[in-house]
Amino acid sequence: MQTRNKAKGDGPALQTVGQVGLGIMGGAYAKHLRAAGFDVVGFDVDATRRAELKGLGGTAAKSVADVSSRCPVVITSLPSLEAVDAAFFGKDGLLDGAPPGTIVIEASTLPLEVKLGVRDVCEERGVIVLDCPISGTGAQAAAKDISVYASGPKAAVKTCEPVFAGFARSMHYCGEYGNGSKLKFIANLLVTIHNLSAAEAMVLGRRSGLDLNLVYDVIRDGAGTSRMFEVRAPLMIAGDYSQATMKVDVYQKDIDIISDYASALHCPTPLFEASKAYYSAAYAQGYAKEDTAAIHAVLERMAGMAPAAGKKTAAGETSAARKKAGKASAANRKSRTTRKASKA
C-alpha cells in the first residue's frame, strides 16, 4: 500500500489521514488525530468547520476528491443518505480522487443496504471500504471515549489500528463487513431506551421533591445507572439542551434505520417502539436541533411542570401561570430558560 506520507521539517514522517465530514463526530476525530501526531486533510461543506480544522493545524481540502487523492486512509462521518451519495459518488467525490488501495473507514450510521452498496461500488474501483460505526455520543467523541465497531477485511482493519487508536478509546474487530452496523443498531436501540429511562427517572425525582444533583450522584453510583444516564442526566438537570452531542432531527434517521432493520427481521422490539413517540414529540415541540436529552422536557410537560431550566419559578407565580408556561410554543421556549421552575 502506498504511504503518501508527508514529513515536517527534519522530523519523522507523519501518516496522513483524511477526514470527510467535520461535524460533531468527525471534528472530534480530527482533533484527536492531530493530537496523536497525524497530518489530517479534511473536507466539509461548511466553511466554518474547514476553518476549525485549519485552526487545529490540519489541512482544509477543496473537495472530497482532494482528500482521497492525498490520503491512504480516509474516515467518512456523514449525516444523511444524500451526503453519502454526494461524498462518494458525486462530482469531485471520493471515487474521483482515490487511487486503488485507498482504505475508507466508513463511520456513519446508515442502513445496511446502503453500506453494502457503497462497498460494492468502491470495490470495483479498487477502494477498500470498512464498515466502522461508532459507539458513543458527541460528548464522548470529544473526550475520546468512544468505541469503534470495525468490520470488513481483517488485513485492512489491522492496517488502520494506529488510526483507530488515534481517535477512539477502543476498537472491536467484528468480523465480516456489515457486522459493525448490525452491532451499532443494537447499541442504538439501547441508547434510545436508556436515554428515555434517564429522563423518566429525573422527572420522577423532581416530582418527588428531591434535589436532582443528589439523584444524579446516588443513581450513577448504583445498579440503576447507565452510560446514557451518566452522560445526559446533567443536561436534564440544567434544562439546557443547546450544546447538542446528538441532535433530535439527526437521531430520527437512526431510529428509522433501527425500526426498518428489526421489522425486516420480524424481530419484536417493544421497549424501543414505545420510546419512539417521545423523540417524535421532542421534534414536534421545537427541539429538532437540540440534544436528544430534550425528551426530558417532553416528560416534564406531560407531568404539568414548567421546564427545569433556571430551576424555580419567580416568586408569587400562580399554578395557572405555570401551566400556561408549560404549554407555551416551542418558539418561545428559549426565552423561558432563565425563568425559575416551580417546586414539584
Image: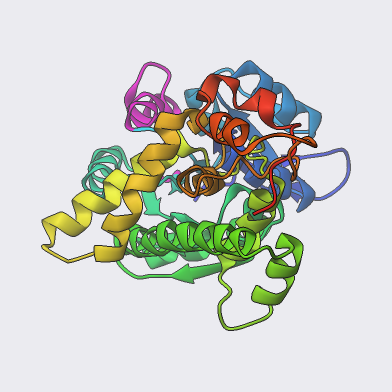
Query: Quarter of the image containing the C terminus?
Result: bottom right
Q: Position of residue 45 (x, y in %)?
A: 53, 20
Question: Relative to 6, is 160 above or below?
Answer: below
Going by the picture, which residue comes out furthest to the right?
10
In this picture, which residue range is highlighted in magenta? 81-102
Q: Residue at x 64, y 65 (%)?
A: 169
Q: Position of residue 183 (x, y in %)?
A: 36, 65
Instruction: Residue 78: tell me if it is visible.
Output: no
Q: Is residue 12 left or right of residue 275?
A: right
Question: Relative to 35, is 332 above or below?
Answer: above
Q: Residue at x 28, y 44 (%)?
A: 256
Instruction: Residue 275: tell me if it is visible.
Output: yes
Color encoding of the figure:
rainbow
Q: Residue at x 66, y 49 (%)?
A: 235
Residue 96 on the magenta span: yes
Considering depth in this image, is 211 or 195 the residue closer to the camera? 211
Considering depth in this image, is 255 or 316 the residue closer to the camera? 316
Q: Position of residue 248 (x, y in %)?
A: 47, 38
Q: Position of residue 13 (x, y in %)?
A: 75, 47
Residue 59 image-quadrant placement: top right
